């Protein structure tokens, strides 16, 4: 009879409380926990690719349960307003945009990119009314590396969106987005899960069950998150082979749900930016933005796109299946070492919220360590 190999220093799994399948966090002893059933607000979220918003155009989107109207003026600047007219509540996106101001379709009230009302057509001469006192909420936005980021909090931004220095001023070579029917946390934890690959992503271009072997990776703290330090990709990750040579990769995670993988192979670089953005409490959008410096790779876009869609679709399919169990509010588990990154996520998320509530600097709970697992 074949012996079952036991993981090294196996700890008892953490049994996590139920509650819509949302997992509580693990604050240090003596620290008041924050409920996991919340979304961070004072932080940058990926909104949409810059290419999706032409000059003189506007686009409506629900983010964190809030209706948002994005627009790009004739000057090229992007703005974001709450997509509700303060007069009668109709979405501003139902109206028109002339490249400078948004006009409500109901009564023609006009608002500039700052959200200030500039005109109420129904007013007649002599009616003393300061229209500039009427405002629509404006959300801070930034453009970086071909993407639009939005700040949904009440305060003004005290940080900048994540940067990709090698790709600054460059739009993604390939972008793919997919909606996942789940709360943000489950999409994020799935994004950083290192053990599901051989079971969920079985394919000729990635890996199979037969390729499972032990791995050991060095991790350390990174801005508002953590990083898997630069290393040679696992030999059972077939997608890296297309680069040839001896590629090296570094993978970082940053709140609220941002994964950036830097792959270097000689003089060439590939960056995979994956962002997880909550649309509301039950829907989350996952976007993959791929950048590369190899000109020949542009010719392979017709091949890359269906592969990327299949890979992302496999993650979505397992989330759909997961929802069938989560609707019964089961207790959930996190084990060491394979689920340590998920534990870090909840610790980081709670520390970010506590630091905001207490008006103090964020203190990263992640320490330098080596994690081991089989995948």
Image (cartoon, rainbow, N blue to C red):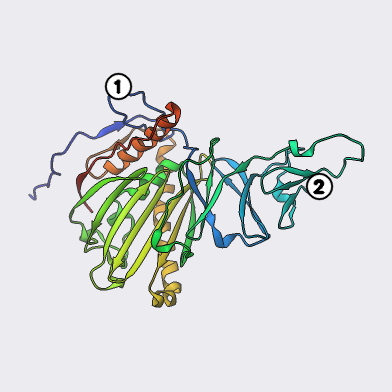
The residue sitting at the top extreme is: 30
Determine whether, in the image, residue 351 is placed left or right of residue 105.
Answer: left
Q: Secondary structure at mark 2?
A: loop
Quadrant position of the C terminus in the picture: bottom left
Q: CA distance from mark 1 to mark 2?
A: 56 Å
Pick the front one: 84 or 336: 84
Q: Name above or below for residue 354 compared with residue 340.
A: above
Residue 168's place in the image compared with 34, above or below, is below
- Name the residue rendered at 82%, 44% in the picture: 107
User: Could you tell me residue 240's position as x and y percent?
Assistant: 29, 67
Within 10 Å of disc 2 (Cα), the crowding (few <14, some 14-19, many 20+) is some
Q: How many marks?
A: 2
**Image position of 126 (left or right of 150):** right
Q: Tell me if 255 is positioned left or right of 194 in this view.
A: right
Which of these two is toward me, 240 or 282?
240
**Image disc number at residue 168:** none
**Residue 119, quarter of the rendered image:** top right
- Whichever of callouts 1 and 2 sits on the residue coming sooner in the sequence is 1
Nearer-the-camera pick, 333 or 237: 237
- Residue plotted at (36% across, 65% down): 270
Q: Quadrant of residue 67?
A: top right
Q: Residues within 10 Å of mark 1 (few under 14, many from 20)?
A: few
Where's residue 290, x and y in %? 42, 63
Q: Residue 30, labelled with which disc? A: 1
- Whether residue 266 is situated above or below residue 154 in the rendered picture: below
- What residue would you read off at disc 2? 108
């Amino acid at each position: 009879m074949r012996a079952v190999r036991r993981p090294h220093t196996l700890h008892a799994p953490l049994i996590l409380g139920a509650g819509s399948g949302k997992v509580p966090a693990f604050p240090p002893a003596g620290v008041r926990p924050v409920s996991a059933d919340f979304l961070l607000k004072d932080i940058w979220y990926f909104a949409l690719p810059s290419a999706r918003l032409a000059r003189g155009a506007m686009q409506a989107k629900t983010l964190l349960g809030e209706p948002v109207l994005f627009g790009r003026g004739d000057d090229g600047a992007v703005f974001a307003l709450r997509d509700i007219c303060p007069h009668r509540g109709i979405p501003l996106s139902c109206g028109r945009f002339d490249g400078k101001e948004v006009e409500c379709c109901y009564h023609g009230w006009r608002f500039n990119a700052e959200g200030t009302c500039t005109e109420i057509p129904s007013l007649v001469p002599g009616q003393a009314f300061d229209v500039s006192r009427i405002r629509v909420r404006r959300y801070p936005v930034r453009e970086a590396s071909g993407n639009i980021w939005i700040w949904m909090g009440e305060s003004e931004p005290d940080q900048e969106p994540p940067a990709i220095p090698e790709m600054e001023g460059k739009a993604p070579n390939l972008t793919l987005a997919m909606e996942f029917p789940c709360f943000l946390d489950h999409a994020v934890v799935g994004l950083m899960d290192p053990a599901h690959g051989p079971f969920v992503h079985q394919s000729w271009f990635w890996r199979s069950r037969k390729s499972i072997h032990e791995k050991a990776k060095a991790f350390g703290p990174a801005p508002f998150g953590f990083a898997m330090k630069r290393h040679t990709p696992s030999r059972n990750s077939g997608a890296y082979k297309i680069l040839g040579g001896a590629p090296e990769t570094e993978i970082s995670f940053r709140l609220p749900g941002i994964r950036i993988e830097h792959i270097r192979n000689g003089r060439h670089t590939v960056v995979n930016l994956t962002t997880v953005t909550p649309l509301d409490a039950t829907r989350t959008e996952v976007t993959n933005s791929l950048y590369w410096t190899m000109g020949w790779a542009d010719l392979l876009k017709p091949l890359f796109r269906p592969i990327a869609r299949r890979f992302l679709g496999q993650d979505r399919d397992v989330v759909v299946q997961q929802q069938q169990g989560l609707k019964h509010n089961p207790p959930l588990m996190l084990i060491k070492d394979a689920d340590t990154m998920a534990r870090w996520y909840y610790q980081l998320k709670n520390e970010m919220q506590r630091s905001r509530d207490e008006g103090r600097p964020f203190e990263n709970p992640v320490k330098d360590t080596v994690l081991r697992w089989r995948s």
